[in-house]
Image (cartoon, grey):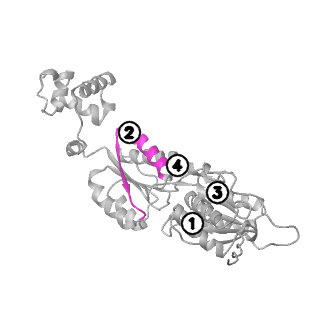
């Protein structure tokens, strides 16, 4: 039926596209579900006709015959954390390139919310990318038995994983602070359920022993700017000259909280973060941080998931490890001590108490 005679309220079907493009309905179906099995010129003609007629594929209806919805789920820990923007972009652009739609799930830093959302979504997606999952290993393995699963920012035996080189990043941060003369480093911890948090603390312990730098941990705190500001309160009671924060948001919160207390960064305390989010270059002073390739991580996780959906076995040996680098800005500086004596940390920058005005 020519499109100019079609009633405006009638839904366009696959048969209308087939008639207009002069092909069979099965060819139209393959052009959308398996384009590699259709001649490129024919597939392009079908897409043009479909667009002109206003035809839209229904992934759920298509799944009834193909057992595929061409949708994947991407689960992130906190949608307000800017780290996930690049992960989402990398995963989504890779999925789009293969004709897949990405369903985004915000777990709100809760393993219960994460698990419930996956259970509701499981039947409508072909596979799942878990970014910084807060669930237990056993729960993740259970889901991996039902759908292809790739885990990002966490290593689990028997499940394909993509991680950044946290040990190397932590080591570079410790070396940088040691080169500046700092012999004590305080680690401001993030969520206890976070796999990178545990890896970074253990890596800092190892680096401290090798570099002869003393380390300690405070926290855990929420991985947010507000969490960093709360950590500044504890740090004020237990001063340090060098701090490694779980992530950039906490590091920025530390800078804000310490500055309000009259502490100079980096004059009194050097601060290093993790992630290299956009704000790390905008805050004053600019934040020294360990940069990770989050776009590449999201893309690699999605690519591996799509190959598993097509029938390839998942790589369950060693995780795929992506490199990191230290970006040095102005939040770190040489340890500032008066020659020949050790002054009490931060005393110089604390605001002086103003004398009371005399009564009239």
The residue at 57%/57% (across/down) is: 248
Up the image or down, 11 lies above or below 113; here it is above
Mark 1 or mark 3: name the one nearer the start of the chain.
3
The residue at 52%/49% (across/down) is: 294
- Cα separation between marks 2 and 1: 39 Å
Mark 4 or mark 1: name the one nearer the start of the chain.
1
Mark 3 or mark 4: name the one nearer the start of the chain.
3
Magenta segment includes 256? no
Mark 3 or mark 2: name the one nearer the start of the chain.
2
Q: Secondary structure at mark 3?
A: helix
Magenta segment includes 88? yes
Q: Estimate the x, y position of residue 347 in percent, counting from the top left.
A: 74, 71
Q: Which mark is residue 229?
A: 1
The residue at 55%/58% (across/down) is: 249
- Residue 292 visible in image: no
Q: Which residues are magenta?
A: 84-109
- Cα separation between marks 4 and 2: 18 Å
Q: Secondary structure at mark 1?
A: helix
Graded by Cα atoms within 10 Å as few (under 14), some (14 to 19) or many (20 or more), the crowding at tag 4 reads: many
Nearer to us of marks 3 and 4 is: 4
Q: Estimate the x, y position of residue 328 in percent, counting from the top left.
A: 69, 51
Point out the image quarter for the N terminus. Answer: top left
Nearer to us of marks 1 and 3 is: 1
Q: Which mark is residue 294?
A: 4
Q: Which mark is residue 168?
A: 3
Q: Is residue 246 left or right of residue 351?
A: left
Quadrant assignment, res 130: bottom left
| Residue highlighted by disc 2 | 96
């Amino acid at each position: 039926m020519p499109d100019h005679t079609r009633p405006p309220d009638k839904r366009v079907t696959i048969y209308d596209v087939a008639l207009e493009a002069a092909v069979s309905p099965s060819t139209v179906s393959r052009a959308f579900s398996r384009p590699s099995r259709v001649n490129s010129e024919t597939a392009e003609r079908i897409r043009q006709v479909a667009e002109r007629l206003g035809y839209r594929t229904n992934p759920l209806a298509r799944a009834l015959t193909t057992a595929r919805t061409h949708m994947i789920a991407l689960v992130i820990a906190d949608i307000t954390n800017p780290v996930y923007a690049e992960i989402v972009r990398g995963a989504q652009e890779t999925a789009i390139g293969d004709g897949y739609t990405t369903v985004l799930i915000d777990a709100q830093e809760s393993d219960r919310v994460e698990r419930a959302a996956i259970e509701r979504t499981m039947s409508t997606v072909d596979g799942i990318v878990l970014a910084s999952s807060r669930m237990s290993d056993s729960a993740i393995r259970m889901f991996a038995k039902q759908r292809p699963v790739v885990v990002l920012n966490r290593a689990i035996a028997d499940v394909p994983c993509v991680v950044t080189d946290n040990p190397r990043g932590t080591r570079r941060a410790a070396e940088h602070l040691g080169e500046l003369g700092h012999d004590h480093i305080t680690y401001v911890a993030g969520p206890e359920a976070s796999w990178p948090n545990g890896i970074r603390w253990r890596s800092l312990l190892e680096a401290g022993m090798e570099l002869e730098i003393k380390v300690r941990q405070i926290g855990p705190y929420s991985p947010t700017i507000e969490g960093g500001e709360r950590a500044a309160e504890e740090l004020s009671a237990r001063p340090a000259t060098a701090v490694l924060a779980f992530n950039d948001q906490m590091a920025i919160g530390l800078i804000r909280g310490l500055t309000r207390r009259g502490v100079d960064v980096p004059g009194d305390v050097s601060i290093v973060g993790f992630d290299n989010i956009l704000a790390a270059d905008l805050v004053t002073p600019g934040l020294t941080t360990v940069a990770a390739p989050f776009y590449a991580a999201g893309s690699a996780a999605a690519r591996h998931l799509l190959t598993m959906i097509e029938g390839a076995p998942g790589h369950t040996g060693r995780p795929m490890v992506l490199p990191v680098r230290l970006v040095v800005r102005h939040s770190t500086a040489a340890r500032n001590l008066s020659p020949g004596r050790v002054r009490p940390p931060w005393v110089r920058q604390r605001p002086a108490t103003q004398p009371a005005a005399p009564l009239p």
